[in-house]
Amino acid sequence: MNILLSLPSISEILTRTGEHLFLVLIAMTVATAIGIPLGILMSRYPKLANPILLVTNGVQTIPSLALFGFLITVPFFGGIGKRPAIFALILYALLPIIKNTYVAMKQISRGLKEAGKSLGLNTLQILFLIELPLALKVILAGVRVASVICVGIATIAAAIGGGGLGVFIFRGISTVDNQIILAGAIPSAIIALLADWGLGWLENSLTETHQKNESNGIKIATFFIILALLLLTVLGIINQSTGDLIVGSKNFTEQIILGEIVAQKIENNTDLKVDRRFNLGGTFICHEAVKAGEIDGYVEYTGTAFTAILEQKPINNPQLVYEKVKDAYNNQFQLEVMPSLGFENTYAILIRGEDAKKYNLKTISEVAEYTPQWQAGFNHEFLAREDGYPGLSKTYNLKFSSQPKIMDSGLMYRALAEKNVDLVAGNSTDGLISFLDLFMLEDDKNYFPPYEAVPVFNQETLKQYPEIQTILEQLSGQISSQEMRELNYLVDNEKKAVKTVVKDFLSTKDFS
């Protein structure tokens, strides 16, 4: 099978690179405009230094994904998309700019400033003619550090629909495809290197005292002309229609496929244009986004909604779980839970196929004998959820050689296959299970609740476009577990593009 089917096209790489540059350039422009004056102010009023540095240092300690997730619910600056991503990048860029400016200004000799005063210079003249020229090299060093930080952290913006090269990195992780990961990582590294080189060149140009001012002026003007042209190019690249409504998804292959099914079904039957915001992180990010109207809908699983969102104890009756989720979502969140798509994607406790044969293991109960010598690997969500690891370990008396390793869902399968861990919690419909020769243990104590896939939409959207509900209800019962595994397999293992796989699948269905 041609692996190029799943690799990003040149135009897509250029588009994502443009988005990445846009995020970084806007964030750095604002951070520089705020950070340098703030650093100067701190040098004038030292009592402000500790509180400001404490706050900016504190921001640096917050994990980037946590900050992006927090911003979803923050008014004005929050939500999903580029706005919260830029705001977060500004926060991360401020510390090195503020700190370097403050340190550089404090190191300037008082005697030089007094000499300026004796020549009749006022405060502003001293600042621009004496202090800033002397401090400029250190200040620009801070801007260089901030720009490299911004380029790296901007890859996380894809988790909240901010676009950029992180889209490829998340996609590559979810499909265990190094080529797609590199499609995002290599351009990002090149941008970081070019940013560091460009700012270094500007730093040297501005601080070379032995050159003539005219020469410096030409260099500086050239730099800013190139920067302006680059920004205009970026704006042109990413100037695309946002669509009439937004469909989101979580950050793994099946969710992206389901999001694409919903999007294509709407576009095939209406004149509406769908803006796809896939790879939005985990359950809680998607839930907060649809609740706040930042996305119009996505596909959720009933057991996840019941235990993780509604924080209820797991129960095993599929119809009862669906009814309780539907009622609670309607009453508490003004969200419409539509009928099941026809399949259930439950948690799958997985081990290597060779271990299942070696120890003759078939159930989770049987594996408890061996787990004290094994290492487990779970994602953050499974470790924290009511229906996740805490309850599972109690139900089956699972004890491991050390604390479970925390890793991204897309990395767990590879880690298990390569013997970095011995047991993971995956998804029962994942195509990688058979591809990597993994074995799914039977949940013989029926611990996990039902996880039926259901579209969840904001009711305000359905009031505006009532035809959407009728169209999506045509998908009810149309996707079996076997079909979902096959779709996942085509994307994960056959390396086919999601849009192509979904288009072919929908063409086989009769929705009349």
Image: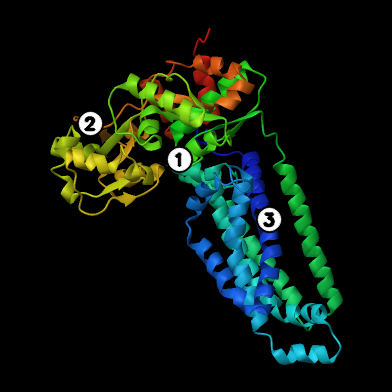
Asked whether, in this view, residue 124 is left or right of residue 421, the answer is right
Q: Are marks 2 and 3 in contact (CB under 8 Å)?
A: no
Q: Measuring 55% from the left and 55% from the top, which residue is drawn there? A: 153
Asked whether, in this view, residue 421 is left or right of residue 310, the answer is left
- Quarter-of-image position of residue 309: top left
Q: Measuring 40% from the left and 26% from the top, which residue is drawn there? A: 325
Query: What percent of the width, then of the height, locates residue 411?
Result: 38, 45
Total numbered labels placed on residues in the image:
3
Q: Residues within 10 Å of mark 3 (few under 14, many from 20)?
A: many
Q: Which residue is mark 1?
A: 284
Q: Secondary structure at mark 1?
A: helix
Query: What percent of the width, then of the height, locates residue 113?
Result: 75, 88
Q: Residues within 10 Å of mark 2 (few under 14, many from 20)?
A: some
Identified by mark 3, the residue type is Leu
Coloration mode: rainbow
Q: Are marks 3 and 1 in contact (CB under 8 Å)?
A: no
- The single residue placed furthest to the front in the displayed view is 331
- Quarter-of-image position of residue 147: bottom right
Q: Measuring 38% from the left and 26% from the top, which residue is drawn there? A: 485
Q: Is residue 223 above or below residue 154?
A: below
Query: What percent of the width, then of the height, locates residue 290?
Result: 53, 34
Identified by mark 1, the residue type is Phe
**52 or 376: which is nearer to us?**
52
Q: Is residue 511 above or below residue 432?
A: above
Q: Which residue is mark 2?
A: 443
Q: CA distance from mark 2 to mark 3?
A: 51 Å
